[in-house]
Image (spheres, helix red, strand yellow):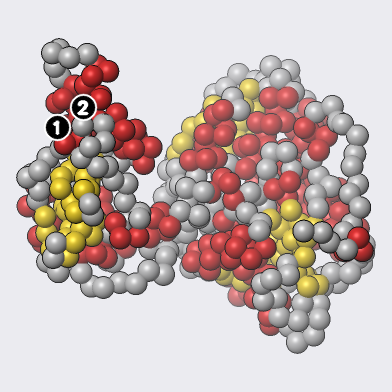
Amino acid sequence: MSFPASTLAAPTLSAPVATPLDLIGKTPMVEVKRMDTGPCRLLLKLEAQNPGGSIKDRIAVEMIEAAEREGFLKPGGTIVEATAGNTGLALTLVGRARGYKVLLVIPDKMSKEKIQHLRAMGADVRLTRSDVPHGHPEYYTDMAERLAQGSPGGYYVNQFANDANAEAHVKTTGPEIWEQTGGRLDALVAGIGSGGTITGTARFLKSVGSNAEIILADPVGSTLAGIVNDGVPGPEGSYTVEGIGQNFVPDTADMSLIDSAYSIPDTEAIATARELLLKEGILAGSSSGTLIAAALRWCREQTEPKTCVTFVCDTGAKYLSKVYNDAWLADQGLSDRELHGDLSDLITRKYEKGDVVVAGPDDTLDTAFKRMRGADVSQLPIIDEGRLVGILDESDIVHIMNTDEITRRERFAKPVASAMTRDLDTVQVSEPLDALIPLFDRDRVAIVQDGDRFVGLITRTDLINHLSLNR
């Protein structure tokens, strides 16, 4: 398909650079065209284009260089930080390139993609609790500070009280936005994780005489929107969005620069991120969903054309197991799935929708085991011509393996039918929750049927999750 030459901007290509660090900043900006922005233009600054995949690359360079200048970080030293993941990735990218060790403390609610990425880059990752408040010894900032004090040559970066954090955005992010918009913007929407982005960018905009409204996008459950709008902390609660929202005001955050705030629930943030991918083709993370949801609210409230700028803070590739995983959203109570008031409400992976990983009786044990491992499950329903004929779990495979009569290769080549359990403990979808308990007492998984039709499986975890979500 060809396009008229007038619609295509000529690409501007730069010469090769020495290291990925030279590619930090100067990120592109794109206009939202297919989502409802009211009378306004909504521009997204694509910070996921940074080499570390997020806006935090900017502050990593500035904070490390400041620590080196001030003598806090010396050759062979260890960079220590508390992070939701992206600052850790950025510090690891920059720190390892400069020869430092990196030790990171991360709350246990963070996506596994971030954690795997960090460890693959050589960071020492320590997970800590995400259900404790600031001041608790296992809160991630308190733990990081303690570890830095016990590490020879350790330097606690402390992005939450590091002046270089906001300064990075005064020097780079703010000027870039001003240049890209030609100084014509009416609103800037940002969140507060450590506070550097909104503070530094707002400082620059005000320094050049901009009257742009500075808007905070805050998850419901964070207390910061209340401080902006009402002068008192908002109700504290839990939320699944990563990287923004706090139950305290970081030292880096200058709240006086912020004009108003929107509280965005997880469901709206996640729905917005998914809509962005569906309609605009941009794969964004969960915090970006919060920012864009707030920006869309502001845009739709306007009565005349205005320009609003916000960020795609990082790539959604770090959240494929969460934001873009329908089963995970259902487990968290964040999906809009229809409830029926029966046992099917406990089943987030239903057979009729193709969500259940299954095997056939003629498949080999090797095939079945690989499917178990790939789906991270311990049992598989065995389906033959659309009917449930058995269940295969790990203990069934172990039993077949526990023989010396044939080779290991021959054991794995045996058909599933030779190992599966045919004596099935089934319950009808209309039965009460109490019907599950005897099955769990016998260490069985509940096989749910609607008449003769297989619906799905219910495990102990499914029951506990259902009771937790419906207290």
Across the whole image, how many numbered discs are drawn on residues?
A: 2
What's the mark number on residue 322? none
Residue 29 in the image: x percent, y percent?
Answer: 80, 57
| Residue on which the image places disc 1 | 418
Q: Quadrant of residue 395?
A: top left
Of the pair 69 and 453, the residue shown nearer to us: 453
Q: Is residue 106 above or below residue 327?
A: above
State left or right for residue 286 relative to residue 334: right
SS at mark 1 in the image:
helix
Residue 336 in the image: x percent, y percent?
Answer: 41, 70
Task: Tell whether label 2 touches label 1 (CB within 8 Å).
Answer: yes
Q: Is residue 340 above or below residue 24?
A: below
Q: Amino acid at mark 2?
A: Lys
State left or right for residue 197 relative to residue 464: right
Check the picture and name the quadrant holding the N terminus: bottom right
Q: Amino acid at mark 1?
A: Ser
| Residue on which the image places disc 2 | 414
Which residue appears at 66% of the width and 72% of the height? 35
Q: Residues within 10 Å of mark 1 (few under 14, many from 20)?
A: some
Q: Is residue 233 above or below residue 69?
A: below
State left or right for residue 349 relative to residue 411: right
Which residue appears at 91% of the width and 52% of the height? 10
Which residue appears at 57% of the width and 70% of the height? 263
One can see residue 142 in this view:
no
